[in-house]
């Protein structure tokens, strides 16, 4: 029993602690979640003490949630539980909530791997949300709406590139500025164009993809009716991995972020690499925003991204600047949102409080990550001038 | 021989603001020769070569390759013209493998993907051809410094360098590794490569180079063949006068041990052992020199002693008091002063004025109930600034606007005024001009004579040998030898590479 | 190694060091020019969307009440201007406090984006105290609310500080998360069925709190309380500015804060506890921001509705305020005044919709804020002026030599 295995066992038991109390098992005694949770904590602590701090800590934290969730479930009405914990629907919702986060995180990956901190993912997402909606409205086509969103996001990100790369600005301050600008510009245009009426109800929607797998239990529910952009997001993960870690372009990207002088002396133009990377991050984040406005909610409202860009950034850090890690993190946060959306069944006013769940999860995740998560070495340092 | 020189720099001038780093410098490199560029720190050697490599644009002058004038606006263009450079701080990506580093920018492809196998094959082929042994699949950060340098050289050759510039290549090598390097260089010149060898080490220059060009304060002084030159003649060119290679110091009479380190072990930032069971002591009235090649644990040792790093085992005692597990604040208060090796990073707050910088050691004592008066700080500072003859500003001048030498004086003034029992001086003369160096050396000897214990940690063997009463050699985290300062450079070199030395 | 590039700032200079350098290099001129440029760009946006920038800015200015300060204003105009100026100062006071919350953090090398959450938490606690304790004497009641609100903000920010000190958590992300958590807690509290929703039987459907007791309201000293005159909160804000300056420049804590802000490595080597400073600094910042929430609730809001919590953005405006003001005491005051005026001038009450739609104007303000922060992030102008000065200096030296 290695510490690593103990850690994973702890994490699995933590999940089990919650799982036994909800449908389909729905064991009603709180003894089960508590017992399983305690064993999970034990495994986690053991792993932690033997060096597997991250895994052990995650197991312990997960066990705490598992016990809490499991015990709470045993105290709730069975009917309510059956309404909330519909695993198929929950996972489908998870995927939907995760998609904008995923696009944002992957976008952030490109930028940060090239050495440019990007906390303006929020703003880029918002820009994409607005221009996606507006573009779809004006052209009558969701596809063109997406294209316009991507272009808008890339151009908006170019501002970040200009200031951070060419003008050597403080990248966090410039990112914060862009977020303000995004709210202001999209809000301004929104009010100017749509006034108090809001975006039209018949905004062209990105279509769902129906797979003929309804009969398959669970998988049919999860994957049977997902939006095109959700699928696109999932496909982007292996694509990103391939591009960044297995192609010459990816090698150059990473070298710019690890040791830009090495890249320069290898004959690369770090400036160009960073510009491309930052604009790509804008395009991807904007795609996530477009999903929000014309793939999910079907309208645009001011500041509709509501902090998702920052959750995406947290997912990126939590996932150690790797595509698959980012996917796992966004799924976790997405699950939190999906659960939060269904929990109002239990308590009407509590519904609002549950909205804070994704942010709490993110906070815990980012706290537990530090020290182990090593960013690209040259992240945030502007290039020295000659 | 009226052959066209491989490289010629004519009247190169480069300014940084008010600093003239290169002043109408001429430099000529013949094909197949090893030409050394010699000068003190700050003489302009690196700048000149960075101009050649396209990292800087010259304000005046021109560059000729094989007799044809060229313009080099970036490293990319320099590489395309056949100029390769091996820098002091390696231009490698630590987390990537040797092969990935080598092919960066000219990657072999199979379809859209990177063809890693053929990259590795290229590395092995080059390695064989030039006699530079490297493992293509090793991650650069796992390699020793000597190996990393070999990768750097291979990188330059991979891109077809006909002119190879090496910037202080032996600064990070042991004596044996340096000899290996020289062998490689001679092999390269036989194959037609021309080499520029930047150094400030006289003995090496005499060993490896065919000719030497000496720079001083941005100007070219002379170009001489190494045949017939001596260390003394070169030193005179470098500095402009006869250099005192020995500091005059009276006989020392050591007293009680003031600093005792026993079996100390600590890890570096990556979690690898950096200090391994180090034991030594510094007595009152002596200067103990700690010699060693860079990155053998000296920095981590100092950090552990002053409380900036947690030890895994062992003890540190200052005048009988156990400070092993105390933080920097208590450790400093126990009677130790630390002249940090990087004055911009650890020594000074550049944005603070001199009074506030000096206050870094004393502010707690000068405060009343949490209240701190700037006037008090300034008053204390003024006295010290006068005593140490700090030029370039006074108590309310921003530290960042002082010259390096004066900044170091401020640090030293502050640390010595704390009336320490033990002084740790780490690279105390790095980046200083000769006058400042003499001042620092004199001061350290004075402190020794006043009964304090001094631990001098330096990469400059000359400095260690001329100042220390006894010398400890550190290699891979351990103290491997104690030698009298009069020992030969060879003996030191052997110890610094882990070899056994007979002490007579 | 004396080869120095021609910028004085090393690439990894802290924000505090950069802004201090900008201040040295550019003085007051550069912030002024930054503002002018930002407004110019804002004007371009206005122009590009088919409106007249000059009349727009004119209309906005009329609403600020700043013309009350000019001696040539007629007495009838004076009356309206007075009302407007009171409004402007009402907005300025919390901005000063929130701006201090951001500036103080920057001085220690921390980026406090959590001002909004700290503000909310402070206002919630102040409201709760203001609603309870019906028979407390006014002075005590207000004092209690002030202390409570400041404490609440300090704790809220302290969480982020502690996380950074203990776990190294990036404060940008943690404070932003805390913002949203605070918002949702606030909405929950005052929502239908929430624990702090009002007890008025006729307002059971409205997601708003009870009103605070008369005795807890901050006294108004200029203007009519019924028309929302200016309350003493502005003095609290100015007192806070003094406290800010004194702490930074006359205390041990301020000395350590500045050292850590400029160079954490040197500070640590000198024995300063960087981690402890992070916690203390964030707590103080939270207190400032919480105080901003307190004076708004006690001064003119008197109740909190879930909508207020959602749309309030004092904490975000404060970022622009602090950066424009170069993180200094005086700078924050004038910056806050500028943005306070801008917010008042673009409000629904004061802006004539026929000239420019207020909702548009609010967003325009955000654009201007964003531009200000963007321009501050690099301050080209400063670097340019610097080089000019250095060239002049060097030529003078050459002549003297």
Image (cartoon, rainbow, N blue to C red):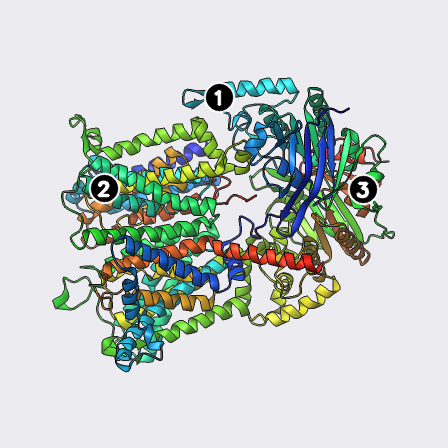
Q: Going from the N terminus, do you reach mark 3 or mark 1 first?
A: 1
Which residue appears at 41% of the width and 53% of the height? C374
Which corner quadrant of the image does residue C116 belong to?
Answer: bottom left
State which chain disc 2 sits on: A
Q: Is residue A130 left or right of residue C234?
A: left
- Circle number at residue A135: 2
Which residue appears at 34% of the width and 67% of the height? C340
Q: Measure how far apart labels 3 and 2 are at the Cα level.
A: 72 Å
Q: Position of residue C206 (x, y in %)?
A: 16, 62
Q: Nearer the viewer, residue C30 or B202?
A: C30
Quarter containing the C terminus of chain B: top right
- Circle number at residue A276: none
From this view, report whether residue B102 is shown above or below residue C175.
above
Of the two numbered discs 2 and 1 in the rendering, the one whose residue sits closer to the viewer? 2
Residue B238 appears in the rendering: yes
State which chain disc 3 sits on: B
Label 3 belongs to which residue?
B237
Secondary structure beneath dot 3 equals helix
Asked if badges 3 and 2 are on one and the same chain, I answer no
Q: Is residue C58 left or right of residue C332?
A: left
Neighbour class for label 2 at 10 Å: few (<14), some, many (≥20)?
many
Label 1 belongs to which residue?
B108
From this view, report whether residue A358 is shown above or below residue C241.
above
């Amino acid at each position: 029993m290695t510490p690593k295995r103990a850690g994973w066992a702890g994490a699995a038991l933590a999940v089990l602690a919650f799982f036994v109390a909800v449908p389909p098992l729905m064991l009603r005694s709180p003894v089960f979640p508590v017992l399983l949770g305690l064993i999970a904590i034990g495994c986690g602590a053991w792993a932690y003490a033997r060096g597997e701090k991250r895994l052990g800590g995650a197991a312990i934290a997960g066990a705490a949630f598992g016990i809490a969730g499991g015990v709470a479930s045993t105290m709730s009405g069975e009917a309510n539980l059956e309404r909330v914990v519909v695993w198929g629907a929950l996972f489908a919702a998870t995927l939907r909530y995760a998609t904008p986060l995923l696009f944002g995180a992957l976008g952030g990956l490109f930028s940060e791997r090239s050495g440019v901190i990007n906390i303006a993912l929020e703003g880029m997402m918002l820009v994409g949300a607005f221009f996606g909606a507006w573009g779809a409205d004006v052209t009558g086509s969701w596809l063109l709406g997406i294209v316009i969103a991507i272009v808008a996001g890339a151009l908006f990100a170019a501002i970040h590139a200009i200031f951070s790369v060419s003008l050597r600005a403080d990248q966090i301050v410039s990112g914060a500025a862009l977020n303000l600008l995004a709210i202001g510009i999209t809000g301004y245009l929104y009010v100017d164009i749509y006034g108090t009426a809001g975006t039209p109800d018949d905004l062209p929607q990105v279509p769902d993809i129906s797979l003929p797998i309804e009969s398959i239990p669970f998988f049919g529910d999860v994957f049977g009716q997902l939006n095109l952009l959700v699928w696109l997001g999932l496909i982007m993960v292996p694509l990103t991995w391939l591009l960044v870690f297995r192609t010459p372009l990816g090698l150059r990207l990473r070298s710019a972020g690890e040791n830009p002088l090495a890249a320069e002396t290898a004959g690369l133009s770090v400036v160009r690499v960073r510009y491309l990377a930052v604009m790509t991050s804008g395009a991807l984040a904007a795609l996530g925003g477009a999903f929000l406005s014309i793939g999910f909610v079907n309208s645009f409202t001011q500041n509709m991204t509501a902090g998702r860009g920052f959750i995406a950034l947290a997912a990126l850090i939590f996932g150690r600047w790797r595509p698959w890690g980012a996917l796992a993190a966004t799924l976790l946060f997405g699950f939190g949102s999906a659960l939060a959306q269904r929990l109002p069944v239990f308590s009407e006013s509590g519904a609002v409080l549950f909205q804070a769940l994704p942010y709490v999860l993110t906070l815990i995740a980012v706290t537990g990550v530090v020290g182990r998560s090593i960013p690209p070495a040259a992240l945030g340092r502007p290039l020295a001038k000659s | 021989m009226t052959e066209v020189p491989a490289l010629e720099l004519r009247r190169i001038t480069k300014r940084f603001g008010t600093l003239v780093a290169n002043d109408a410098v001429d430099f000529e490199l013949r094909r197949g020769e090893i030409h050394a560029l010699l000068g003190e720190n700050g003489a302009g050697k690196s700048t000149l070569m960075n101009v050649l490599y396209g990292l800087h644009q010259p304000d005046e002058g021109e560059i000729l390759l094989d007799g044809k004038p060229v313009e080099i606006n970036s490293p990319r263009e320099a590489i395309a013209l056949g100029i390769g450079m091996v820098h002091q701080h390696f231009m490698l990506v630590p987390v990537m493998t040797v092969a990935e580093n080598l092919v960066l920018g000219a990657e072999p492809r199979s379809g859209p993907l990177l063809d890693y196998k053929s990259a590795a094959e290229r590395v092995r082929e080059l390695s064989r051809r030039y006699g530079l042994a490297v493992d293509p699949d090793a991650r650069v950060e796992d390699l020793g410094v000597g190996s990393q340098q070999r990768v750097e050289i291979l990188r330059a050759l991979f891109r077809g360098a006909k002119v190879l510039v090496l910037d202080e290549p032996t600064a990070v090598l042991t004596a044996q590794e340096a000899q290996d390097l020289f062998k490689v260089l001679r092999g390269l010149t036989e194959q037609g490569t021309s080499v520029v060898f930047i150094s400030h080490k006289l003995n090496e220059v005499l060993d490896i180079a065919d000719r030497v060009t000496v720079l001083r304060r941005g100007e070219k002084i002379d170009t001489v063949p190494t045949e017939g030159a001596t260390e003394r003649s070169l030193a005179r060119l470098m500095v402009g006068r006869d250099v005192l290679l020995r500091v005059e110091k009276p006989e020392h009479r050591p007293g009680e041990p003031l600093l005792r380190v026993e079996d100390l072990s600590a890890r570096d930032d990556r979690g690898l052992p950096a200090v391994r069971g180090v034991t030594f002591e510094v007595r009152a009235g002596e200067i103990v020199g700690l010699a060693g090649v860079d990155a053998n644990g000296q920095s981590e040792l100092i950090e552990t002693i002053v409380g900036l790093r947690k030890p895994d085992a062992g003890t540190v005692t200052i005048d009988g008091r156990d400070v092993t597990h105390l933080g920097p604040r208590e450790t400093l208060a126990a009677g130790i002063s630390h002249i940090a090796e990087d004055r911009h990073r650890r020594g000074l707050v550049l944005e603070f004025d001199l009074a506030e910088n000096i206050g870094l050691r004393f502010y707690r004592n000068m405060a009343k109930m949490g209240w701190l008066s700037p006037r008090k700080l300034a008053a204390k500072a003024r006295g010290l600034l006068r005593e140490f003859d700090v030029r370039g500003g006074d108590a309310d001048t921003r530290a960042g606007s002082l010259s390096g030498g004066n900044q170091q004086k401020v640090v030293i003034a502050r640390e010595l005024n704390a009336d320490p029992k033990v002084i740790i001086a780490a690279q105390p003369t790095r980046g200083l001009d000769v006058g400042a160096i003499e001042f620092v050396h004199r001061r350290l000897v004075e402190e020794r004579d006043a009964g304090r214990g001094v631990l001098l940690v330096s990469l400059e063997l000359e400095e260690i040998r001329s100042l220390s009463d006894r010398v400890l050699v550190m290699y891979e985290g351990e103290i491997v030898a104690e030698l009298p300062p009069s020992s030969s450079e060879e003996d030191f070199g052997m110890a610094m590479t882990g070899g056994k030395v007979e002490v007579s | 190694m004396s080869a120095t590039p021609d910028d004085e700032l090393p690439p990894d200079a802290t924000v505090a060091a950069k802004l201090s350098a900008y201040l040295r290099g550019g003085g007051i001129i550069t912030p002024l020019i930054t503002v002018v440029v930002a407004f110019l760009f804002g004007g371009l946006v206005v122009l590009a969307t088919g409106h007249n920038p000059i009349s727009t800015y004119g209309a906005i200015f009329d609403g600020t009440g700043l013309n009350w300060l000019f001696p040539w204003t007629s007495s009838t105009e004076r009356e309206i201007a007075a009302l407007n100026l009171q409004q402007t100062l009402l907005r300025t006071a919390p901005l000063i406090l929130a701006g201090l919350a951001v500036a103080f953090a920057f001085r220690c090398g921390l980026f406090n984006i959590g001002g909004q959450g700290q503000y909310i938490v402070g206002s919630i606690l102040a409201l709760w105290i203001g609603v309870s304790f019906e028979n407390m004497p006014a002075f005590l009641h207000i004092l209690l609310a002030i202390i409570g609100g400041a404490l609440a903000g300090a704790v809220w920010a302290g969480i982020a500080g502690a996380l950074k000190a203990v776990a190294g958590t990036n404060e940008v992300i943690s404070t932003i998360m805390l913002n949203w958590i605070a918002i949702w807690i606030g909405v929950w509290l005052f929502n239908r069925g929430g624990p702090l929703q009002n007890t008025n039987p006729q307002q059971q459907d409205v997601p708003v709190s009870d009103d605070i007791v008369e005795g807890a309201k901050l006294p108004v000293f200029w203007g009519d309380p019924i028309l929302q005159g200016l309350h003493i909160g502005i003095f609290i804000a100015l007192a806070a500015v003094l406290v800010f300056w004194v702490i930074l420049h006359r205390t041990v804590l301020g000395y350590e804060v500045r050292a850590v802000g400029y160079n954490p490595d040197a500070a640590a080597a000198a024995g300063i506890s960087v981690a402890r400073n992070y916690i203390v600094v964030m707590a103080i910042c939270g207190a400032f921001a919480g105080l901003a929430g307190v004076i708004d609730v006690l001064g003119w809001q008197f109740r909190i509705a879930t909508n207020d919590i959602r749309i309030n953005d004092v904490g975000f405006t404060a970022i622009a305020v602090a950066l424009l003001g170069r993180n200094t005491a005086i700078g924050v005051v004038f910056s806050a005044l500028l943005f306070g005026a801008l917010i008042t001038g673009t409000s629904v009450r004061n802006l004539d919709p026929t000239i420019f739609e207020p909702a548009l104007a609010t967003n325009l303000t955000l654009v201007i804020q964003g531009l200000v922060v963007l321009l501050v992030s690099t301050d080209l102008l400063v670097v340019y002026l610097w080089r000019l000065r250095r060239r002049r200096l060097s030529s003078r030296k050459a002549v003297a030599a």
